[in-house]
Amino acid sequence: MSASMPMLAGIVSTVIFASSTLPMLVKALRTRDLTSYSLGNLALANVGNAVHSLYVFSLPPGPLWALHSFHLGSTVFMLVWYLRFGLGRTLAEPRL
C-alpha cells in the first residue's frame, strides 16, 4: 500500500466527520437552544480532547491534526455556547 492511500483515507474521513458535525454547530448557534446537551458530557469531551491533544500533536502534521483541531474547536464552542445559552434555560426549567 502506498503512502498516499492512508493520506487520502485521512483526508476523506476528516471531511466526512467535519461534515457530520457542522449541522449540529450551525443549529446550536442559530437557535441558541442547547437544552438537549449535557454539561457533564461536554465537559468530559473537552477534557478528553485536551488529553488526546498531547498524543495527536506529537505526530507529524497531517489530516489527523485537521480532524482533531476541528473536533477540539467544536467541543470548546459547544461548551462555551452551553454555558452562555443553555445553562440558564436548563436551570430555569421547573423540576418535576
Image (spheres, helix red, strand yellow):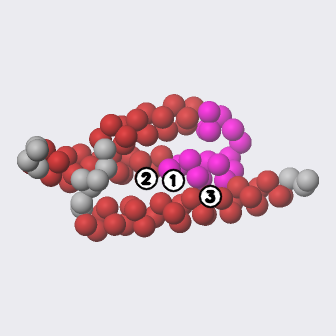
The span shown in magenta is 55-71
For the point 57% across and 59% down, the residue is 17
User: For the residue labelled by badge 3, is the local secondary structure a helix, a strand or a loop?
Assistant: helix
x then y, percent, for residue 84:
21, 50
Q: Are marks 2 and 1 in contact (CB under 8 Å)?
A: yes
Q: Are marks 3 and 2 in contact (CB under 8 Å)?
A: no
Which residue corresponds to mark 2?
74
Q: Is residue 78 magenta?
A: no
Frontmost residue, 34 versus 66: 34
Q: Amino acid at mark 1?
A: Phe
For the point 29% across and 53% down, the residue is 36
Predominant SS along the magenta part: helix
- Determine the residue located farthest toward the right in the rendered image: 1
x then y, percent, for residue 16:
60, 63
Which residue corresponds to mark 3?
14
User: For the residue labelled by badge 2, is the local secondary structure a helix, a strand or a loop?
Assistant: helix
Q: Are marks 3 and 1 in contact (CB under 8 Å)?
A: yes
Please give left or right for residue 32 compared with residue 63 in the image.
left
**Quick one: label 3 or label 2, which is nearer the N terminus?**
3
